[in-house]
């Protein structure tokens, strides 16, 4: 009997994943602790410096600076707090608008809200899954004015202060295009590089192009500190300000407690940094494993019609944080049956995030036409992506 693609695709996806991930249950993304984690954690406990002072924080910041090429790194409690401080330092004030993709994790939008600013949602492109620079430029031409060096939203009268592109699932956005838009329209660019540690655009690490960039070390990211984040910048003054603001704005003194503004208790604890130092040592190995996993999936899915595996954009090097399937748009009605078949088979898969403008707290925010983000949201499926799925076979 003739079977349509509707009948066979979910099962083909399950079998393709099985051929790579094996017969066991597979999580979407699991951390692995196969380096010096226990050793450094023990050293940290033995030192009694488990909290906001200690040598692992300084070392983690130095190691990250060396790995990413960012001149300055400030380690903080999570990626959301890193974004919050980066936005403040970029000059985002109450009542400003900040351009962010509709296709992102809610942390990007929340950090804008913590500044009492308003997220303004922009569309994505299919090649990178990140902000579409050409569409954004045309939108800004039509909907904004320049007044005394500021970009003004002609319809709300508010200042559009910053643009926060995000490197989706580890794939670098069109940085050159977006930097040109930011400079032509007098908008500050900050990169949400939470997902892209180990990803490079034209040979340079993501998160180092904007005036500030941010990382996350949550448990599901490429490396983890339990919870954690970092602010990257090449500007010494901004780095000083970031350190000051994230450490309660305390003035350095041996015994006096004096603070010169309202700061935040956002400093990464030494215990988390100890884990981070060990994880970072293993990062090159994890990245190689994730690339090998991509190649295996690529082979497995090359034979499956109607669906494609997301590849790194040209001239870019992705960390392949989350492996991503893209349904051909005529098959988007099959997304949920594929999600069900794979999860039933023990392979954790999930769709893209609900788009920001569809979430209750962000329904009223300004936005451009989001047709590509809407198409992508219907067609994206993340599949098991842990580095641990291949290390035993490397
Ligand atoms: C993980 C993530 C963050 C930061 O998350 P935290 O859990 O606060 O570390 C921010 N933006 C994006 C796109 C993310 O994926």
Image (tube, grey):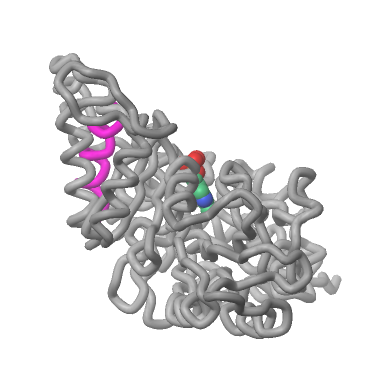
Number of callouts: 0
Between 150 and 56, the residue placed more toward the observer is: 150
Q: Is residue 147 above or below residue 33?
A: below
The residue lying at 18 percent from left, 14 percent from top is 48
Q: Residue furthest front?
A: 148
Q: Is residue 370 above or below residue 217?
A: below
Q: Is residue 317 above or below residue 51?
A: below
The residue lying at 69 percent from left, 80 percent from top is 139
x, y (%) of residue 183? 47, 78
x, y (%) of residue 368? 74, 71
Query: Relative to 207, is 112 on the left or the right?
Result: right
Magenta segment: does it hold 275?
yes
x, y (%) of residue 169? 50, 59
Specify whether residue 24 is in view.
no
x, y (%) of residue 27? 52, 41
Q: Quadrant of residue 284?
A: bottom left
Range drawn in magenta: 271-284
Magenta segment: does it hold 354?
no
Q: Is residue 30 above or below residue 316?
A: above
For the N terminus, which image quadrant?
A: bottom right
Q: Quadrant of residue 246?
A: top left
Between 223 and 381, the residue placed more toward the observer is: 223
The residue lying at 60 percent from left, 73 percent from top is 151
Between 343 and 366, the residue placed more toward the observer is: 366
Q: Residue furthest right?
A: 1
For the C terminus, which image quadrant?
A: bottom left
Q: Quadrant of residue 133?
A: bottom right
Between 36 and 199, the residue placed more toward the observer is: 199
């Amino acid at each position: 009997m003739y079977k349509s693609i509707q009948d066979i695709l979910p099962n083909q996806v399950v079998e393709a994943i099985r051929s790579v991930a094996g017969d066991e249950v597979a999580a979407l993304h699991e951390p692995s602790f196969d380096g010096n984690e226990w050793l450094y954690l023990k050293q940290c406990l033995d030192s009694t410096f488990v909290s906001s002072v200690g040598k692992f924080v300084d070392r983690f910041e130095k190691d990250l600076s060396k790995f990413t090429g960012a001149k300055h790194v400030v380690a903080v409690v999570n990626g959301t707090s890193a974004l919050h401080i980066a936005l403040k330092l970029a000059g985002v004030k109450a009542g400003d608008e900040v351009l962010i993709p509709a296709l992102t994790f809610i942390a990007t939008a929340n950090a804008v809200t913590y500044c009492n600013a308003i997220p303004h949602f922009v569309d994505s492109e299919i090649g990178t899954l990140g902000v579409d620079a050409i569409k954004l430029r045309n939108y800004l031409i039509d909907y904004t004015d320049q007044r005394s060096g500021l970009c003004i939203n002609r319809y709300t009268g508010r200042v559009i202060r910053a643009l926060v592109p995000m490197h989706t699932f580890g794939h670098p956005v069109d940085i050159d295009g977006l930097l040109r838009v930011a400079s032509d329209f007098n908008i500050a660019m900050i990169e949400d590089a939470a997902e892209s540690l180990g990803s490079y655009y034209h040979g340079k690490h993501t998160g180092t192009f904007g005036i500030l960039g941010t990382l996350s070390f949550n448990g599901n990211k490429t490396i983890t500190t339990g919870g954690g984040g970092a602010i990257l910048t090449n500007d010494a003054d901004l780095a000083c300000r970031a350190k000051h603001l994230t450490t309660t704005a305390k003035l350095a003194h041996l015994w006096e407690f004096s603070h010169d503004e309202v700061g935040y208790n956002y400093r990464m604890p030494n215990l988390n940094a100890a884990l981070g130092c060990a994880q970072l040592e293993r990062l090159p190995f994890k990245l190689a494993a994730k690339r090998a996993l991509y190649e295996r999936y690529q082979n497995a899915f090359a034979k499956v019609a109607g669906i494609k595996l997301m590849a790194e954009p040209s001239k870019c090097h992705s960390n392949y944080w989350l492996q991503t399937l893209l349904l051909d748009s005529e098959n988007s009605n099959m997304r949920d049956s594929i999600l069900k078949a794979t999860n039933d088979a023990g392979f954790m898969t999930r769709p893209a995030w609900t788009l920001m403008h569809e979430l209750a707290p962000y329904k009223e925010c300004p936005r451009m036409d989001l047709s590509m983000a809407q198409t992508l949201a219907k067609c994206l499926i993340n599949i098991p992506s842990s580095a641990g799925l291949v290390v035993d076979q490397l």
